[in-house]
Image (cartoon, rainbow, N blue to C red):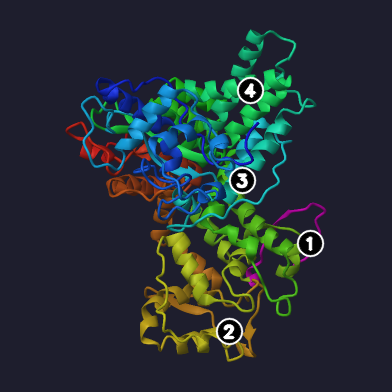
Amino acid sequence: MFSRTILTLVCLTVGGSLSGPAARAADIAKGAEIYQSACKGCHEVSIGPPLAGVVGRPVASEPGFGSYSDALKERRSLVWTKDELDHFLAAPREWIPGTLMMQTVPDAEERAALIAYLETLGSGSDVEEGTAALSIDQPVIVAVRRLNESQYRNSIRDIFGADIEIKARFEPERREEGLQAVGNSDLSMTSAGFEQYFGLARSIAAQVLDPARDNALAACSQAGSMDEQRECTEAFVGHYGERLFRRPLTSEERAVRVHTALESAARDGDVRQGLQLALTSLLAAPEFLFRIEMAEPDPGNPGALRLDGYSRAARLSFLFWNSAPDEELLAAAATGKLYQADGLQAQVARLADSPHYEEGVRAFFSDLLQLDGFDNLVKDPAIYPKFSQVVADSSREQMLKTLVDLLLVQQRDYRDIFTSNETYINRALAAVYRVPYPADTAWAPYTFTPDSERAGLLSQVGFLSLFAHPGTSSPTRRGIKLHEIFMCEPTPDPPADVDFSKVKDSKAGTVRGRLLDHMENTGCVACHRRSDPPGLALEHFDGLGQLRKYENGQLIDVSATLNGVAFVGAGGLGQLLRTDERIPACLVRNVYAYSAGQLPAPEQAEFIRRSTREFAGDGYRLPGLMQRMAVAPAFFNVLVPEGLAATGANARDAGATGR
């Protein structure tokens, strides 16, 4: 049976021996292949500790790695000698009970090859001729990103069915450059987090293999012959392995899980239990939990790399559907169609024409607009008695419904999100907006009247309440987030010695007056001159987003000037933003960064500028933008990873090939 927890599926290998000095280089080469295909994906993204220098290192002693199991911590007096590593790899759970390492390397020659390679890591010595040194002429991992919660849930639903229940709280995500999609590239996984994923894997596998479900692949009858059982098990592992890993399993990955399933079935007399073990192993594998992008040598550009077909498929699928690739997209990757312009265009058009496309757009804007903040939004109940979690959830949904309707259903100009008074409301929001709700449905379309001062997304309760304080509005915070989200212009943190006492005195006059007093601080003027005007124009809306005209008995002035242009209120701000060239350029940048998990490289500046021009030429329509970017060669651009040896004369320019 599986151990209680797993951290890595490592070193599923074949071949190699260490019979003497003459064979050492060949064994190290085989060990390098093993490491690249099975170990690197975890041990170079902090799921497992770095393996450089592991031979001869004390157990659980790698500086900076904080996810060692208690079992390893208790053995810090031991050293990872070659003999100790050999025993551990042969049967880790038996050699050190309670370890987070699960998978075994039962063959002695395979272990020897791997250990021989591990000896070379971090040694600083040259390896004998014949060693498989990392170079640009072999596939390499170029990006690793942890699946977020919605991607995990959607993948499980699309692979196994909507009836699979997922009951868990996921580890927090990290936001970098304004996007969690970028921050997730730097995330690993804690031991506690992996225990949770393992528990989920077991729960999902048990549901999938429930006899009550109609699952033809799982119908491997115990009454059949061993050959029939093996054939059925291989089909089961191969099918679900490809869907979960988003690529076909290697022969080693398939063989070890088939062996586990058949061994369990023979021991316990229960084929389904064996399949459940194999499926749990797939679901708990880093290859599923992380999006691992691979690059391969580009046959049309010697010395350069291109993103491989399966990595392209995953990038497209998570952008358009926020889920794993379906079988048709995987088949297109397998046949090389995603390298061909017509094949790529056909798949992108299919993805954009699917009902799942709405989920992809929702996921993008949820990240861009930082809507995860609604999960922990707090308001002072004495000041805002209408606020509740229902209102918070409804506010988030209103923003997404508005965006989907304007940008997908009506295919309006993207800039209309700042000026349109068309939206959707439900009964909870109607109370906050102070408008009637005569509809019998849960949600209903609604058009705000001019006297409501509601114009565009920035005047909706969602934006206004999310970027405010628990008991007051915040022009500065609203302005900072407007620049960050829609203009790609982050604001630096304030100096540590700034006095905020005047601003925080909510009983003294209006926020506008308090901010003007605050800007007398020498170090504050530059940032506040940029961030405050948009927020001041929104001051007719309190910290919950309710309309008001007075604060502490004083009439609120919502006039403002930004970059020499005067405007008044939410309507004036929306019109100003609609003509700001930074707005569409920022969206283009963010579409790429969201899909690639990183900001555009300097070599891609022209691609971003061209995409922005084409966006304008198409009337600023989002579907067209996403489809054009997704079929452009530069969308799959690969930069040579740091430290990788280039073999071609033009290898240093590979990042600019766009292949």
CB under 8 Å between discs 2 and 4 = no
**3D distance between C-alphas at marks 4 and 3:** 22 Å
Dot 2 lies on which element?
loop
CB under 8 Å between discs 3 and 1 = no
Q: Marks 1 and 4: which is nearer the front? A: 4
Residue at 51 percent of width and 31 percent of height: 246
Three-letter code for the amino acid on which mark 4 is drawn: Ala
Q: Which residue is mark 3?
A: 195
Q: Marks 2 and 4: which is nearer the front? A: 4
Residue at 44 percent of width and 73 percent of height: 531
Looking at the rendered image, the quarter that the C terminus falls into is: top left
Q: Which residue is mark 4?
A: 261
Corner quadrant of residue 340: top left
Magenta span covers which residues? Answer: 435-452
CB under 8 Å between discs 2 and 3 = no
Which label sits on residue 556? 2
